[in-house]
Image: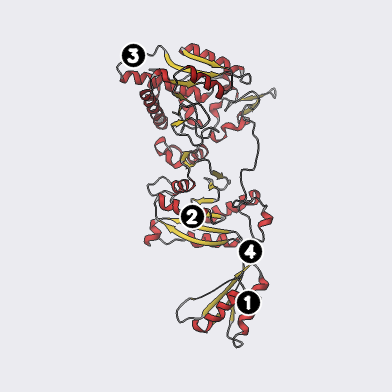
């Protein structure tokens, strides 16, 4: 079979992995359902073109295992569904009919909308499963697995998604490696084809000739798969919500108190093997923008431990910052824990995968795809030109990838720059503080300080010693300098002059 042979002879390890996984899904479906019970939804696009040839190869290999093949594939017995639309490109229609003729597809043409057309088809035929060319990142892909029952309100059938985890690069690697025909629009700069009303050539592939007429390079030359849908008309809306669940502007938060918590993931910190330098630095940074830190916690490298802590903090804090445990190692469980806390799955993120591919090149093979798995449906990548890989934001949880204080400084500075335009981490009224030093004992100061805390509830009044025999240091911190001065004056009046001295 020419498709299987082309892949086997390819040097692309990643493509081989993707192919093998897709073929496994197809053969599994063909083992679960009879040929009369399966169908294939074909729309003439690149994804469904790839799926057509995967199905051809999968069906051939399935029959080979059953000892039923004569060595060639002369027909394609899987029922093929094509939803014809007046808004479809003529080139898509032509390619679809030509393909059906070339490969002997049993084409069922449906002119009504997808749902009602599907209902009629399933009533008239014993179809129980439909192969779909859905990929992660498609609007309809959220929540889907390789085998996913149809959604409530739809006719019952099993959605089978063999290429769910394929990227733009994977699709074109397959098409070019196997030398299969595809719709001519892809040679005219179209990278993602919808209807004639919402699709134009991708401007990133634009070239100008000597006659100043705009031309476009073919779709497979798009180097950055993250921009596949750049030729689709978009309805723009703000993708970044304000802090927490509120809808007020940044200015409305200025005088209020926003609270964050910090989670460190790492058994090395718990065991005392390494000293946590990021935690103190991060708390100072959060404090510097006028936020309060409610709690810092260190959890072990365990998905459930991370999930439990994130779930607890995300509902009681305006923002949760987490670091450690991000990467391909067995101990890197942070993203899995965050996903579990939000009740979503980890799914391949093509945009993030492209960053990783540019960063580590050939080392990012199909076998290491778990590096690009992110919490599905809640993840936003925060891009900055100074960062090789974007920061990861899952609703009100921000995940740092820094491993030392210098890297954290860089990530934090980029985050602050991004928030100036997006507003999801507003800068609040800064904290001010004052410190006093005294040789009084703890017993002598205990009751006056307790009363002072009741008198000035908006201030954080604390005390500590650098050594047991050293002087007692009393700190006053808040957002109102006048209140701090009043509290200091009230305390000093209770003792003899000179009992306290200021620390600068």
Check disc 3: other Cα within 10 Å, few if <14, some if 14-19, many if 20+: few
Q: Quadrant of the N terminus?
A: top left
Q: Helix, strand or loop at disc 4?
A: loop
Percent position of residue 18, x then y: 42, 30
* Of the image marks 4 and 1, the number of the one nearer the N terminus: 4
Q: Position of residue 448 (x, y in %)?
A: 56, 81
**Under tag 3, what secondary structure?**
loop
Q: Which residue is mark 1?
A: 487
Tell me the CA gap for discs 1 and 3.
91 Å
Distance from Cα at disc 2 to Cα at disc 4: 27 Å
Pair 1/3: label in front? 1
Decide: is 10 above or below 443.
above
Disc 4: which residue:
430
Q: How many numbered badges does the structure rendering display?
A: 4
Residue drawn at the location 41% of the way across and 32% of the way down: 14
**Spatial CA span between label 3 and label 2:** 59 Å
Q: Which residue is mark 2?
A: 312
In this orientation, which residue lies closer to the viewer: 120 or 504? 120
Q: Residues within 10 Å of mark 4 (few under 14, many from 20)?
A: some
Q: Do the CB atoms of the residues marked 4 and 1 lie less than 8 Å apart?
A: no
């Amino acid at each position: 079979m020419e498709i299987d042979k082309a892949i086997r002879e390819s040097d692309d390890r990643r493509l081989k992995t993707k192919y093998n996984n897709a073929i496994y899904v197809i053969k599994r479906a063909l083992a679960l359902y009879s040929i009369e019970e399966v169908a294939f939804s074909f729309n003439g696009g690149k994804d469904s073109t790839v799926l057509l040839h995967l199905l051809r190869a999968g069906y051939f290999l399935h029959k080979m295992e059953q000892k039923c093949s004569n060595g060639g594939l002369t027909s394609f017995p899987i029922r093929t569904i094509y939803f014809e639309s007046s808004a479809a490109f003529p080139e898509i229609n032509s390619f679809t009919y030509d393909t059906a003729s070339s490969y002997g597809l049993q084409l069922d043409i449906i002119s009504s909308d997808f749902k009602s057309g599907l209902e009629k088809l399933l009533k008239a035929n014993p179809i129980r499963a439909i192969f779909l060319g859905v990929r992660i990142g498609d609007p309809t892909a959220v929540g889907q697995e390789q085998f996913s029952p149809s959604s409530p309100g739809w006719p019952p059938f099993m959605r089978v998604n063999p290429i769910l985890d394929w990227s733009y690069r994977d699709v074109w690697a397959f098409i070019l490696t196997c030398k299969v025909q595809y719709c001519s629009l892809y040679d005219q700069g179209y990278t993602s084809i919808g209807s004639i009303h919402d699709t134009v050539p991708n401007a990133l592939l634009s070239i100008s000739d000597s006659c100043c007429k705009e031309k476009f390079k073919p779709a497979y030359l798009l180097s950055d798969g993250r921009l596949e849908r750049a030729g689709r008309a978009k309805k723009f809306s703000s993708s970044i919500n304000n802090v927490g669940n509120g809808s007020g502007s940044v200015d409305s938060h200025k005088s209020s108190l926003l609270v964050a918590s910090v989670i460190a993931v790492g058994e090395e910190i718990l065991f005392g093997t390494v000293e946590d330098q990021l935690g103190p630095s991060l708390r100072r940074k959060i404090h510097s923008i006028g936020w309060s830190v409610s709690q810092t916690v260190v959890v072990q490298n365990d998905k459930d431990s991370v999930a439990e802590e994130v779930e607890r903090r995300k509902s009681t804090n305006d923002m949760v910052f987490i670091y450690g445990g991000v990467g391909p190692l067995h101990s890197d469980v942070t993203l899995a824990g965050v996903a579990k806390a939000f009740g979503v799955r980890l799914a391949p993120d093509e945009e993030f995968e492209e960053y990783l591919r540019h960063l580590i090149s050939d080392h990012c093979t199909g076998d290491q795809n778990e590096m690009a798995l992110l919490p599905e449906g809640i993840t936003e990548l925060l891009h900055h030109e100074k960062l090789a890989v974007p920061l990861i934001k899952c609703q009100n949880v921000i995940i740092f990838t820094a491993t030392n204080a210098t890297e954290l400084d860089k990530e934090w500075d980029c985050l602050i720059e991004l928030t100036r335009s997006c507003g999801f981490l507003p800068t609040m009224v800064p904290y001010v503080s004052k410190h006093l030093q005294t040789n009084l004992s703890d017993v002598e100061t205990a009751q006056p300080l307790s009363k002072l805390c009741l008198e000035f509830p908006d201030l954080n009044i604390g005390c500590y010693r650098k050594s047991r025999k050293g002087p007692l240091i009393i700190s006053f911190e808040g957002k109102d300098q006048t209140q701090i001065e009043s509290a200091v004056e009230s305390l000093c009046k209770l003792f003899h002059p000179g009992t306290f001295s200021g620390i600068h």
